[in-house]
Amino acid sequence: MLGTFSPDSFGGMTDTVDAQASLEAVLKDEILRMYQEVADNPDGEFHFYHGREGAERFGYASEWLDRAPPGAVDSFAGVGNPHERADMRPGETVLDLGSGAGLDSIIASWAVGSTGKVIGVDLNPSMCLKAQAHAAATGTTMECHEGRMEEIPLPDASVDVVISNGVINLSFQKRRAVEEMYRVVKPGGRISITDIVSAKQLSQSIVNDPKLWAS
Ligand SMILES: C[S@@+](CC[C@H](N)C(=O)[O-])C[C@H]1O[C@@H](n2cnc3c(N)ncnc32)[C@H](O)[C@@H]1O
């Protein structure tokens, strides 16, 4: 049966769209604040693993953590180890989506070497500056673009490998983010992401809480 729309139902739809847009805006602010805080004050209290302890828990090699600049290690806020299966090779181009303070990009830059390239993308331009400074401190380079994973600022089929660590769960448009990864990866390339999934439907009170969503 075809439904009919009354002025009220249009009003309801508008309310829903407005509510989603405002929740999305609040969430974006909270994400910017939360990860900036991890980068600026890594010794603070966070209810997720971070820093060296988190990275060791996820199997990051001690040599990586000893070699990377302390600022990148202390501000690490990933949820797993995307390097394990990424199989990055010298000369390849790697995209690190949601590159944060740069630890994953720096590890990728060692894997692809001076003939390869690492491109970070992050919502927060000051995280991009931090990541680039951390990379420079180790004598390596990465370029970082301010941008959204839902609209990756790169051409089609332009990278060999996409890595991402703890970022997709932050998106309001997860399908779109995944479509974007497939758009930018070259045919035969690899996508290696570590993220959080829930086997249970989360309650609305959790879904609508920007602090819980952002972490
Ligand atoms: C969980 S941390 C990523 C950790 C990082 N890979 C590391 O090695 O520490 C989340 C990062 O993703 C960025 N981010 C969140 N939402 C984003 C989006 N929609 N597009 C791009 N980056 C985003 C945040 O600004 C933050 O720097």
Image (cartoon, rainbow, N blue to C red):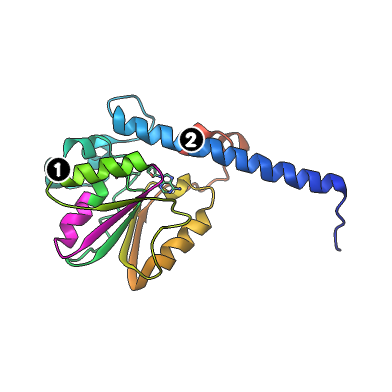
Amino acid at pointer 2: Asp
**212 falls in the magenta region:** no
Q: Which residue lies furthest to the top in this view?
A: 44
Q: What element carries label 2?
A: helix
Looking at the picture, tell me which residue is in the foreground, 207 or 24.
24
Report if residue 215 is visible in the image.
no
In the rendered image, the quadrant that contains the C terminus is top left
Q: Residue at x 19, y 66 (%)?
A: 89
Image mark count: 2
Which dot marks residue 29? 2
Residue 215 relative to residue 15: left or right = left
Find disc 1 in the rendering and name its residue. Answer: 137
- Residues at circles 1 and 2 in contact by the CB criterion of under 8 Å: no
Q: Which residue is drawn at 85% across and 44% down?
A: 8
In this image, 2 relative to 130: left or right?
right
Quadrant of the rendered structure where residue 53 is?
top left
Ranked by sequence position, the earlier of labels 1 and 2 is 2
Q: Residue at x 24, y 46 (%)?
A: 132
Residue 190 spot, x, y in % from top left: 33, 66
Residue numbers of the magenta segment: 106-124
Occupied quadrant, residue 109: bottom left
Is 116 one of the magenta-colored residues?
Answer: yes
**Separation of disc 1 and disc 2 at Cα?**
29 Å
Q: Residue at x 46, y 47 (%)?
A: 169
Q: Which amino acid does label 1 sit on?
A: Ala
